[in-house]
Amino acid sequence: MSEIPLPSMEGPVCPLPLKHDEQIILGHGSGGRLTHDLIRNVFLPYLISPPLKEGDDFARLADCKGEVVVSTDCHIVSPLFFPGGDIGKLAVCGTVNDIAVSGARPLYLTAGFILEEGLPIRTLVRILESMQAAAQEAAIQIVAGDTKVVEKGKADGLFITTTGIGFLPKERSINGHNARPGDIILISGSIGDHGIAVLAERGELGFSTDVSSDIAPLNGLIQELLAAAPRTHVLRDPTRGGLATTLNEIAFQSGVGMVLEENLIPVQPAVRAACEMLGFDPLYIANEGKVVAIVPESEADAALNAMRRHPYGRQAARIGKVTAEHPGRVLLKTSIGAVRVVDMLAGEILPRIC
Amino acid sequence: MVDLNLLNRALRNEQTVKAEIEKIRQIITRPWVLMEICGGQTHAIMQSGLDQLLPPEIELVHGPGCPVCVTPLELIDKALTIAARPEVIFCSFGDMLRVPGSSSDLFTLRARGADVRVVYSPLDAVKIARENPHRQVVFFAIGFETTAPPNAMSVLQARSLGLKNYSILVSQVLVPPAIQAILSSPQNRVQGFLLAGHVCTVMGYKDYIPIARKYQIPMVVTGFEPLDLVKGIHAVIRMLENKVIDVENAYNRVVKPEGNPAAQAIIEQVFQPVDRNWRGIGTIPLSGWGLRPEFAGFDAELKFGVMEITTRESPLCIAGQILQGRKKPVDCPAFGSTCTPQNPLGAPMVSAEGACAAYYRFARRPV
Amino acid sequence: MCLGIPGKIIELYQQAGLRMAKIDFGGVIREACVETIPQARVGDYAIIHAGFALNLLDEQEALETLSLLRETGVLDEEIGGQNSTQD
């Protein structure tokens, strides 16, 4: 049983009745009074939806039209906060994007939280606020959730698992097998921003930069893209492993080759400078707010223009073509006009001096 | 006022690079074998695909300029022994993390709980030593002459700060003895050298003149960007076609004939010439640097009393032949099959600038 | 063996007994030890390797490289053509 005096529930209940320097303790995960209060007073004010308000262990979703698309993701990013976002925003946007790239409309999310004993509640509130803002922007509801607490040292502050649900109109068929020779490869903006922003924030390599993570919910951008280019073949968001890994996966799935042009791939000058200093290749650095679109040639211009009209696609660019040759292989025409292979990421990216 | 971004893009521009290559095409009359000594140059050539654009008469072979690749196996094993100790914080450049020892590597050790930290600079390791007075901090001081000044400076700083918990595991190697070893071999095919630009910015290039004369091999100090590399190659070919034997500088932006005397003084204070064992090649006399006796307190090998270690090299790995430019990675039966970056048998497949890794990552090989 | 890139010295100071500088690599700032270039001033360019200055960049040579390219008409193309995103 808990030794901490329970806050009074009389009168108007402040959304944050617990003191600001209060921390998560093991009791918060025990399923009893403390858990109940944590959920009611800390989680629910930010994760607002009718099902959550109901208080059942399930959510009934009536508004279901079309094929159901579901996706799940675990988020363990460290540090929890970095320029451009935090683990909460990442969790919401990451799963929204995974659903959106199927061509489906994401509508609902669930969120599971594993909290580390000792996590300041203030920190948790900041993350929940961020999730609320991201959910609002993406026009999705968080309809179910769970929370547990682990001993100090067993989680980096907190881990979040999200599952997303969306609905796919019948005529849509967008998946990794659909790339065809002749298709044009588009990217919605600059690559490597997220990875470099997080690395800078971690501080281990001692550099600083103005680069912000590009975390963003892309369902709005994708809807406009699909309206302009309804015959889009493939959509995917290049996250861990970078653009190179994502394109290799698609090339393999579709049994096609790809040729990219180095000069056309957008990279922010500061991201390029960080990569030069550390010996990284921007093609392998993580993104969290970009989408790759592979579209038939006839719709490439329309797709590009639609992306550029959207705030998250201003730097969208045509970066390559799909070919029938060298199936499964991605090649790059380098800035000096030669051709080399672009492989998948193998292992961890480590800074080098050689 | 130099726009660094613009300079970088200019050095990687298709038009200017191809224009410089055209100049080579106009003077070349026969095949030539050139060696670039520096792994960073190997990486740059393969990543940009420059080798594909050069006239077919030019064969580029890759030298042992990869300090990661040539660090002897027993030293890797010593590093692993030291890093496994609970009181040790083992700091290393990222390059060394996945180099295979006899039975493990630093990366695996870290996964098993050893405190192994990647640092960008040896001075970061000194900072860690200051912040952790009750732990022993060891820095894996590998490198050619380029990395000797920062490695040496870390020791000087530790000494001036009175630190007793900082030491370095030294694997410093030198370029001129390596070039001599390659050129004196009866199987040598190299006819011209691209010298390592950043080694020369520290040490200058006067030391290479007697070697060039002795073996009658022209050499050019070369940079790392595509345009710098082509200019270096152009200068060597020009000398070869005109039967000129000399050491020229194609990296004037950064290199002076005398190098950087202040950097050399720092090295002189801390290091002295020693024999070094090169992985895959063998012992080359006076081919490395070791700590001077007055810095014995900073020598990790002495501090941790790491005894004779039995090493076990993979019998399939032909790294030695590759490092001397006698074979190419594609000549190795294990290349791409038993030996890949995920499961490397030898160092050149692990090092970012190792020839095998460069070929695997960038060369056009079938799926 | 030598990943070294040029950066601009934007600040000089002493720290823990060493002459140090803040280096701007073009949107990325990192400190480096500049003991090997005692003549360096703020505004100079240096080649940095492993958090350490190896030498000063000869600005004259760098500008000559740039102007050589300007002659071929390449640079104007560079500013207009090549894809780079501005913050």
Image (cartoon, rainbow, N blue to C red):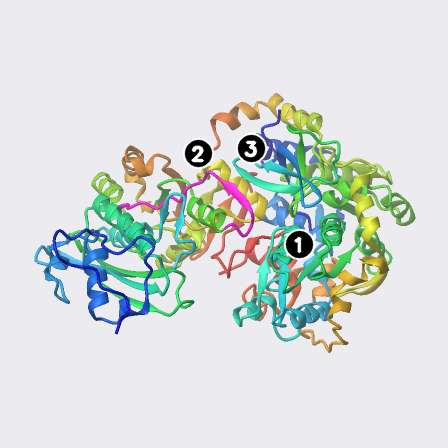
Q: Which residue is mark 2?
A: C85
Evaluate whether label 3 is on the same chain as label 1: yes
- Residue B155 lies left or right of residue A48; in this view the side is right
Is residue B300 visible in this depiction of the protein? yes
- For residue A178, what is the image quadrant? bottom left
Vertical order, B332 against B154 (above or below):
below
- Residue B169 among magenta residues: no
Q: Nearer the viewer, residue B215 or A87?
A: A87
The amino acid type, in three-letter code, at marker 1 is Val
Q: Chain for mark 1?
A: B
Which badge, 3 or 1, comes first in the chain's sequence?
Answer: 3
Q: CA distance from mark 3 to mark 1?
A: 32 Å
Q: Chain for mark 3?
A: B
On the image, the x and y values in percent for residue A170 come to 15, 54
Residue drawn at point x = 43 percent, y = 67 percent: A153
Q: CA distance from mark 2 to mark 3?
A: 12 Å
Q: Which residue is mark 1?
A: B126
Stretch in magenta: A203-219
Q: Main secondary structure of the magenta part?
A: loop
Q: Secondary structure at mark 2?
A: loop
- For residue B128, what is the image quadrant? bottom right
Q: Which mark is residue B5?
A: 3
The amino acid type, in three-letter code, at marker 2 is Thr
